Structure formats: structure tokens, C-alpha cells
Image (cartoon, grey):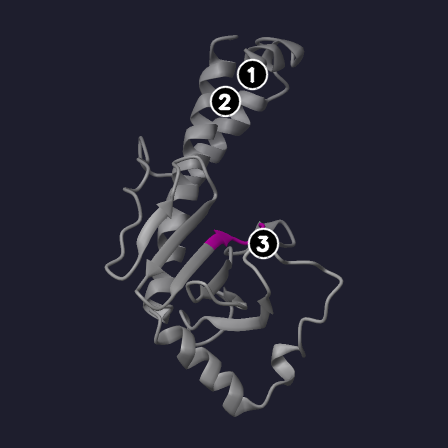
Amino acid sequence: MFLRRLAALCGGATDGGVLAALRAELASEFSFAAIPLPPPFHCQDFVTVSDAPLAEDLLLRRRTHSEEVLVSALLAPVMFEGQEPLPRDLLVKVFVSKPGATPVLHFDCGLWLEEKPFGQYAINAVRYHSSPGDAREDKYEGPEFRDLDPQLKAALKEYLVARGVNSKLVSSILRHLYQKEQAQHFKWLKTMEETFTKDH
């Protein structure tokens, strides 16, 4: 209903070129008649906790008798170079906790598509929380990750790899979220096109 009202406000058939622009966007961005949503994310080492079709993020969990690893990921906001959108990077948060013990380790990671070699994710920050919900901004969170000793940085990366958070997993997540975003974008454009077509 909202879209129909929007079309009416744009002048019905005289839509200011919206319909033509929508069709041009569809033609330039998509070469298929339809783009289905990808199946729910599957990984041998992790259980998918949340991967709703219309959600932008993905939540995975790996649980053993001695610890729990949570991985939360979403695509970074769209950035532009001039008029052209750049490939979207991947933002990842990893939480490692021990049953009945504190603190909770928190890693901020990312896969930057402009970085080489492609597919190598990086840790941006590591901190700890006294409890899963304790993420106050007024407490000391440790030094900048880039300022840590190289040997310590490498050891922290291996710590995550040993818990299944490796380049293969991160690249698979990026591919899945990109496919889902493309399907959502296509559906939005088609819905807008259908709405404005009805008023012509």
C-alpha cells in the first residue's frame, strides 16, 4: 500500500522517469529473470543459529564440552569511488567463552576485498568482557591490535583458526551474504517495478 501511495505521489503514469530508471537498473545489474535466495548457510564445523531470508546478518555457533564460539557476520556499508559502488567488505565478530567461566573473548575481524591476497581476513581488535552482555564503552579495551607484537598477533590468529574461524569459513560467509544481498536487491527492484507499472 505504501508503494502504491508513493507511485501516486509521483504522478501516476507521469512518474518522473522512475519506472524507466528501475528497468534500466534491472537490465544493467541483473542478466537473469529471477534470482532465488540461497539456501540457509551450512558449515560442517558450525551450527547456523540465525540466517533469516530478509536479515542482513548471519550468526553461527560452535559448541564443545569446553567452550562455545559464536560468529556474527554482515556486509559492510556500501562505499563509493566517484559514482561507482565498491565491493562490500565483510565485518565479523567472534566471541569465545568457557562454560561457567569469564571473561568472554571478543575479536573484531574483517575481510577487505581490496587487500591482497584475496580471502585473507584480518583481526582488527581483540578485547574481553566480564560477561556476554558486558560491552561498555567506558572501560579499557586494550592496546590497538596493530600495535601488538607481531608474534602475539600471529598467535591470536592461530587461536581463531584452531576454532574453525579460518579463511575458508570467512570467504564462504562473504559469498553467502553477497548472494543473499543480491537476491534481496533484485526482489526489491522487481517489487518497485511492478508497483509503478500498475499505475501506467
Q: How many residues crowd mark 3 within 10 Å: few (<14), some (14–19), many (20+)?
A: few
- Residue 200 location (% of width, % of height): 51, 8
Q: For mark 1, what is the residue?
A: 3
Left or right: 5 in relation to 44: right
Is residue 153 placed above or below 124 in the rendered structure? below
Which one is in front, 138 or 45?
Answer: 138
Is residue 88 placed above or below 190 in the rendered structure? below
Q: Residue at x 51, y 59 (%)?
A: 89
Whether residue 74 appears in magenta in the rendering, the answer is yes
Disc 3 versus disc 2: nearer the observer = 3
Which one is in front, 152 or 80?
Answer: 152
Chain-order first, disc 3 or disc 1: 1
Whether residue 167 appears in magenta in the rendering, the answer is no
Disc 3 versus disc 1: nearer the observer = 3
Is residue 59 placed above or below 44 in the rendered structure? above
Q: Which residues are magenta?
A: 73-78
Q: For mark 3, what is the residue?
A: 133
Amino acid type for the residue under numbered disc 3: Gly
Q: Residue at x 37, y 47 (%)?
A: 49
Secondary structure under tag 2 reads helix
Quarter of the picture containing the N terminus is top right
Q: Residue at x 61, y 53 (%)?
A: 79
